[in-house]
Image: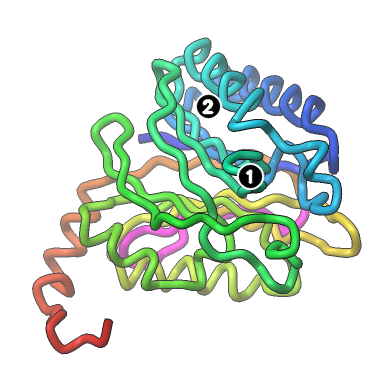
């Protein structure tokens, strides 16, 4: 499977402009790279304009989900649609979504772990359900959002349920860039899966963002990586046979002893 990750600089508080930028980018990228699957970053419609989200957020995924569905059908491409600010159930959630080549919305996930360092908890509601495995083109994926990457207990069940690829979408700040890279490599090694991430660049309200969208293989080797500060497309192709090979060479799942682990 071939991926294109849009490491974008988000225009703060301008959802319509950001959607148009994504549409323009995808039109060009389909000509240049012909990806099977594209990845967008976290909160790409609004950026972290938290005090303004009540007036900027989607309403139950509209208009962004139909927008992504139309793009997916037009270009016959899978879209891991990053995440958006999303009003529903009496709150505003940080919601990720996945649309397949047919334009079908096949998965949604609300970010469970809210970032205290960015005051997310003051403006957003945390998701109440753990991420689940979904399929694209016969491959099994998991999807998490930014701060979730710090919680291995959220991710291990995805590997146990057969996930071959973990996607992480983020607005991860430059101040913790070394954590961003190291945690992705750790999650790949400990779960023997690919980790594919999409992070933003640029800055907002005094926070610079780290870029370094990347792909890590199940052995922990970095296959492709974006820059610190440049808007760019990070491309990669995954060999899913490597997941089976690494799990055979170092059989950690056969070696687990769950009955002695504290729950």
Would you identify the image quadrant in which residue 192 lies? bottom left
- Tell whether 7 sits left or right of 151: right
Would you identify the image quadrant in which residue 10 lies? top right
- Residue 180 pos. (x, y %): 59, 68
- Residue 253 pos. (x, y %): 15, 70
- Where does the C terminus fall, quadrant-wise? bottom left
- Tell whether 197 sits left or right of 204: left
- Residue range in magenta is 215-229
Residue 227 in sight in this render: yes
Q: Which of marks 1 and 2 is nearer the N terminus?
A: 2
* Magenta span main SS: loop
Q: Mark 1 points at which residue?
A: 90
Q: Residue at x 66, y 44 (%)?
A: 7
222 drawn magenta: yes
Nearer-the-camera pick, 10 or 258: 258
- Tell whether 141 sits left or right of 249: right
Nearer-the-camera pick, 117 or 209: 117
Residue 58, relative to residue 209: is it above or below?
above
- Residue 110 pos. (x, y %): 52, 49
- Sort mark 1 into few (<14), some (14-19) or many (20+) by Cα contacts within 10 Å: few
Front position among marks 1 and 2: 1
Residue 2, relative to residue 158: is it above or below?
above
Nearer-the-camera pick, 143 or 92: 92
Q: Mark 2 points at which residue?
A: 33
């Amino acid at each position: 499977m071939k991926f294109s990750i849009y490491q974008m600089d988000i225009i703060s508080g301008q959802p319509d402009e950001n959607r148009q930028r994504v549409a323009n980018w995808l039109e060009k990228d389909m000509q240049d790279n012909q990806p099977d699957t594209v990845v967008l970053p976290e909160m790409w419609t609004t950026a972290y304009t938290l005090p303004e989200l009540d007036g900027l957020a989607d309403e139950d995924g509209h208009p962004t989900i139909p927008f992504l569905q139309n793009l997916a059908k037009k270009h016959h491409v899978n879209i891991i649609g990053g995440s958006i600010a999303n009003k529903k159930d009496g709150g505003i959630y940080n919601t990720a979504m996945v649309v397949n080549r047919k334009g079908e919305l096949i998965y949604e996930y609300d970010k469970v772990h809210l970032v205290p360092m960015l005051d997310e908890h003051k403006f957003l509601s945390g998701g109440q359900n753990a991420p689940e495995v979904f399929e694209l083109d016969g491959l099994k994926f998991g999807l998490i959002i930014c701060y979730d990457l710090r919680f291995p207990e959220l991710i291990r069940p995805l590997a146990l349920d057969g996930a071959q690829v973990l996607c992480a979408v983020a607005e991860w700040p430059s101040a913790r860039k070394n954590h961003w890279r190291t945690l992705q490599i750790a999650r790949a090694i400990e779960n023997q899966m690919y980790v594919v991430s999409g992070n933003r660049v640029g800055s907002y309200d005094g926070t610079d963002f780290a870029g370094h969208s990347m792909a890590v293989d199940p052995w922990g080797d970095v296959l492709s990586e974006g820059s610190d500060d440049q808007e760019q497309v990070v491309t990669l192709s995954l060999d899913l046979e490597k997941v089976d090979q690494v799990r055979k060479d170092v059989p950690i799942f056969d070696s687990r002893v769950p009955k002695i682990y504290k729950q």
